[in-house]
Amino acid sequence: MFKLKVDQEISLLLVHERFAARYAELARENYDYLAEWLAWPSFAKTEADFRKFALDSLHKYADGKGMNCAIEYRGEIIGNSGFNTIQSDLRTVEIGYWIGEKYQGNGIITRVCRFLIEYAFDELKMDKVQIASAVDNQPSRAVCERLNMNLEGIVTNRERVGDRILDHAIYGIHRNRE
């Protein structure tokens, strides 16, 4: 199994169909929390939805266009992170992530993203890592700031979440740039 060890508590496991039940459980338990900032909870609710997500993600990985991983924290799957997009021609990746609400505040996402940034630069030979966060999603923006990413700008009308249209703050970090 594809497994990357982030630290003593956290590993990333390449997404797999066998995680579908756990993802569906997390999505149900955390629907309000996740749906505040993410569009997918309204249409990904069942094991079948997450099996399709896993299969689509594996095809994307095989094509070199993405890498979705389950976040394993202290032996339990608590969310998902990885590269939503890999643009080899531009040598750029975009990180995405989500975790169950009760796991927030433990530095998990910051550690995962720090690991993914290093992985993108060292293993994938990328030049830029990007994260897009809803402008008002302060916890997500704080992750980017803790990682010393630069705010590159605000993109208006970037995503529809429920009945709201959200603007996104775009953060980036470059290899070998101050």
Image: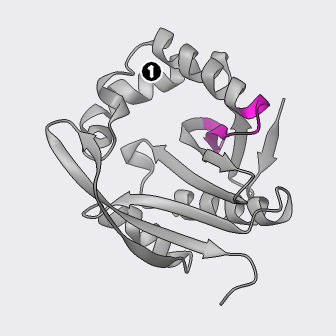
Where residue 52 appears, as percent x and y from the top left, is 55, 15
Q: Which residues are magenta?
A: 61-76
Within the image, what quadrant is residue 169 found in?
bottom left
In this image, 94 relative to 10: left or right? left
Dot 1 corresponds to which residue? Answer: 24
Mark 1 element type: helix
Which percent across, then down, holds residue 65?
69, 39
Residue 106 in sight in this render: no
What residue sits 53% from the left and 57% below the top?
Answer: 109
From the viewer's perspective, is residue 107 above or below residue 35?
below
- Residue 115 place in picture, x, y as percent: 70, 61
The x, y position of residue 55, in whole percent, is 64, 18
Number of numbered callouts drawn: 1
> Can residue 77 be seen in the rendering of this structure?
yes
Q: Verify whether residue 63 appears in magenta.
A: yes
Q: Nearer the viewer, residue 90 or 126?
A: 90
Quadrant hosting residue 177: bottom right
Q: Residue furthest left?
A: 163
Q: Amino acid at mark 1?
A: Ala
In the image, residue 44 lies in the stretch drawn in magenta: no
Which residue lies at the image location 55% right of the left edge and 22% below the top edge?
53
